[in-house]
Image (spheres, helix red, strand yellow):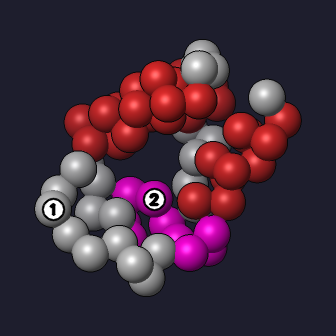
Amino acid sequence: MPDNDYSNITEESDIKNDLGLNSIGFLYLVLGIEEEFNVEIHNINADEFKKVKDVISYLDKK
């Protein structure tokens, strides 16, 4: 991830645009989430991650 200030990121923030992630950055984010929370995120699920709240909701279900 780029070295930015993410203090203004909210649940409504767009993951790719507001975090400034390209496709590789998004992949690293997903891999980091899998490692940190000990979950497996399939490609179908990852495509559904548009906003931060989508990731939170996915993790809450796990």
Q: Give the side of residue 19 with respect to residue 3, left or right.
A: right
Of marks 2 and 1, which one's residue comes earlier in the chain?
A: 1
Disc 1 crowd, CA 10 A, few/some/many (<14, 14-19, 20+): few
Mark whose residue sits in front, 2 or 1: 1
Q: Which residue is mark 2?
A: 15
Q: Residue at x 56, y 75 (%)?
A: 10
Q: Residue at x 26, y 42 (%)?
A: 25
Give, as a single range, the part of the protein colored magenta: 10-18
Q: Which residue is mark 1?
A: 3
Q: Amino acid at mark 1?
A: Asp
Q: Quadrant of the C terminus?
A: top right
Q: Position of residue 53 (x, y in %)?
A: 67, 60
Do we see residue 23 in this rendering? no
Helix, strand or loop for disc 1:
loop
Spot the residue most to the bottom: 8
Instruction: Please check the rendered image and state whether residue 57 is part of the magenta-colored stretch, yes or no.
Output: no
Do we see residue 55 in this rendering? yes
Q: Position of residue 48 (x, y in %)?
A: 63, 42
Instruction: Please check the rendered image and state whether residue 11 is part of the magenta-colored stretch, yes or no.
Output: yes
> Answer yes or no: do the residues labelled 2 and 1 have beta carbons within 8 Å?
no
